[in-house]
Image (cartoon, rainbow, N blue to C red):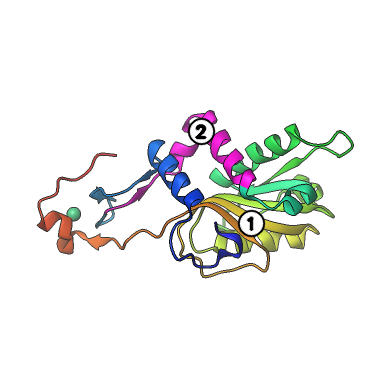
Amino acid sequence: MGVNSQLPSGPTSKSQKAIEDLQRYEVLMLNGHFDFGNGYHGRVYLNPHQLFRYPSTIWRFAQDLIDLLPRSVLDATDVVAGPVTGGALLAHTIAGLLDSRREITRPPTSFALLSVDAGGAHSLSRFYQRQVKGRNVLLVDDVRNTGQTFARCAATIRASGGTVLATAEIYDRMEAVADLDVPNVSLAEYKAPENYPVAACPLCKAGVPVSAF
Ligand SMILES: [Zn+2]
């Protein structure tokens, strides 16, 4: 399980179950022959939109992710923040699930949205800057690629006076180059095999039909 994103020697049973769940909901398609439409073919296709197509799907994965998060992080979380679009939808769901089991004496868990400005940078509107100021923030995203989105979002939250407690994602592509000095928890970890330029695709050469998705 990806606490502190140590490279695992193999999928944990929890991660294995999550990968099976992701396949069942067609978020993750393995062992196919996919045409990505950009000149590359590959065996693995990840479609995060499937996480959000039915709300019940993301509620289920959000709950599974909460179950993996350290108690100390959950207890200290005031705000759950995420970048548009998938991260924000996940953050909103997690904030709601945490709130539903909050002790009556604690203030409600709130949600903060990190939007993308015209220059492609993640930012908090003034409204959300006020939400995170002086608060403990759990930063989430649907998928972690290089980790740079988390790094930029964390910098934005810190610049607004918030404290980032941890990062968490449904799916870690195991390609993180940017690491934060906070724990990271992922529900599923899977490093996809490389993609091939169409002209060099061994699946095409072997006559494997292109998969529909
Ligand atoms: Zn091919």
The residue stretch that appears in magenta: 43-67
**Ligand 1 picture quarter:** bottom left
Q: Position of residue 53 (x, y in %)?
A: 47, 32
Contact? badges 1 and 2 (CB < 8 Å): no
**Is the CB–ligand 1 distance for label 1 below 8 Å?**
no
Count the marks.
Answer: 2
Question: Dot 1, how many residues are within 10 Å of its Cα: few (below 14), some (14-19), or many (20+)?
Answer: many
Depicted 37 relative to depicted 193: above or below: above
Q: Is residue 106 found left or right of 28 in the rendered image?
A: right
Question: SS of the residue at dot 1?
Answer: strand
Depicted 51 relative to depicted 42: above or below: above
Instruction: Verify whether residue 45 appears in magenta.
Output: yes
- Tag 1 residue: 167
Q: Earlier in the sequence, mark 1 or mark 2?
A: 2
Q: Look at the image and tell me whether residue 151 can be seen.
A: yes
Q: Position of residue 25 (x, y in %)?
A: 41, 36
Instruction: Verify whether residue 57 appears in magenta.
Output: yes
- Tag 2 residue: 57
Of 96 and 39, nearer the camera is 96
Figure quadrant of the N terminus:
bottom right
Q: Amino acid at mark 1?
A: Thr
Q: Look at the image and tell me whether residue 89 can be seen.
A: no
Residue displayed at 45% across by 39% down? 49
Of 129 and 3, nearer the camera is 3
- Residue farthest toward the right in the current orientation of the protein: 105
Q: Position of residue 135 (x, y in %)?
A: 82, 52
Residue displayed at 54% across by 44% down? 86
Q: Is residue 207 found left or right of 134 in the rendered image?
A: left
Figure quadrant of the C terminus:
top left
Residue displayed at 68% across by 57% down? 166
Q: Amino acid at mark 2?
A: Thr
